[in-house]
Image (spheres, grey):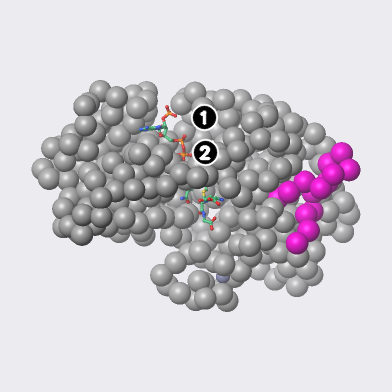
Amino acid sequence: MATQGQVIKCKAAIAWEKLKPLSIEEVEVAPPQKGEVRIKILATGVCHTDAYTLDGHDPEGIFPVILGHEGGGIVESVGEGVTSVKEGDHVIPLYIPQCYDCKFCKSPKTNLCGRIRATQGKGVMPDGTSRFTARGQKIFHFMGCSSFSEYTVVSEMSVAKVSDKAPLDKVCLLGCGISTGYGAALNTANVEDGSNVAVFGLGAVGLAVAMGCKERGAKKIIGVDINEDKFEMAKQFGCNEFLNPLKVEDTVASLIEMTDGGCDYTFECIGNVKTMRQALEACHKGWGQSVIIGVAAAGQEISTRPFQLVTGRVWKGSAFGGWKSRDSVPKLVDSYMDGKVMVDEFVTFTKPLVEINEAFDLMHQGKALRTVVNM
Ligand SMILES: NC(=O)C1=CN([C@@H]2O[C@H](COP(=O)(O)OP(=O)(O)OC[C@H]3O[C@@H](n4cnc5c(N)ncnc54)[C@H](OP(=O)(O)O)[C@@H]3O)[C@@H](O)[C@H]2O)C=CC1
Ligand SMILES: N[C@@H](CCC(=O)N[C@@H](CSC=O)C(=O)NCC(=O)O)C(=O)O
Ligand SMILES: [Zn+2]
Ligand SMILES: [Zn+2]
């Protein structure tokens, strides 16, 4: 290919500083080094975590940066030693890699590969450098993905090869939000038939939780959100009862009453430490489990009376739905192609790259589940 080994000049949405709109401008993308893959991104979702970082809430947030971690694209070229993908493969970049070799990857108990986590958190490639330059300045990577660029470079262990029949402008959402919620229900909570469940926050993540709970045969799937516009939409994903915390005196007491003693499972999909506490305390005494998925702002801490745990409630967390990423994402894509996993229904808006800031506006206005940005 003509671009192989060359610096590619393309457009990217750069976050120069926190709380400022992204700036669409030319970026230089260096060729992939040893063990790296350069990807032509065709589409990307915008996740709440991108907004959280842009708004300065991420303790690891670093600027200038190219955000985005819900991308889909085609391999443009690969660096030395890369064997698992080749030019032309359809791929989804992964913010939790899978190296197959670290103690996390070797354990069946977690999906949190630790191999490149330290450099990823510092916004650089595993060798400590960046592949992005703009206006003569180094631009940082984000979550090992940086999908808000027409081209990006990621580590080979952060790439899932997916079916080339799958529409990348849909399955890009399996790079984060949908897989996260769906896996939290299936893997982390392992929800069983007949369960009573409450989902706090009916964004894409929360509705994907509902989809997983419905698949498992949950009886009550209670959607909890302050934005009632989300309720009608939530029904198609499995929510069959609703609660607006602004309309009741005591959210926890209401949920306990609705479920005859408390929920078997609750999921916090907002990122608010107050709702995390409510989600735990709405669980049934003796066995209820609460899964934290939402990402809380820097400095926030959770609390509850230890008695809540002494009396059998379990507090858990879930990252990327517990999926071991390179193994699972291709299968999730196949499940979508087989009609088992909903994806299209999560796409509420599509925008060109030049309008990417509107995707953030739509999210903040509570109008979008997911906006897919076509690069
Ligand atoms: N652990 C992980 O692996 C992952 C975590 N996340 C995190 O999950 C969370 C959800 O992400 P996403 O679905 O993209 O976000 P969204 O913003 O799309 O959804 C959040 C929903 O919660 C609602 N909400 C806000 N405040 C409250 C409240 N006090 N009580 C009830 N509902 C409320 C919002 O309402 P409104 O419409 O009014 O905004 C919105 O419907 C975020 O914190 C994100 O960072 C995301 C992906 C992966
Ligand atoms: N960088 C933050 C934490 C951000 C965070 O919790 N990220 C989630 C994914 S959110 C996706 O939309 C996650 O899976 N984290 C696992 C990880 O290893 O980062 C902080 O420092 O608090
Ligand atoms: Zn995300
Ligand atoms: Zn690993």
Q: Residues within 10 Å of mark 1 (few under 14, many from 20)?
A: some
At 22% across and 48% down in the image, what residue appears? 283
Q: Residues within 10 Å of mark 2 (few under 14, many from 20)?
A: many
Quadrant where the image shows the N terminus: bottom right
How far across and down, in percent of the image, does residue 204 sit?
44, 39
Q: Which residues are magenta?
A: 128-141
Q: Is residue 135 magenta?
A: yes
The quadrant where residue 221 appears: top left
Contact, mark 1 vs mark 2 (Cβ under 8 Å): yes
Query: Which element carries disc 2, helix, strand or loop?
Result: helix
Say what amino acid the circle numbered 1 marks.
Met
Q: Is mark 2 within 8 Å of ligand 1?
A: yes
Tell me the number on the disc at residue 48.
Answer: 2
Q: Is mark 1 within 8 Å of ligand 1?
A: yes
How far across and down, in percent of the image, does residue 368 sit?
49, 29
How far across and down, in percent of the image, does residue 97 sit?
58, 62
| Residue that label 1 marks | 363
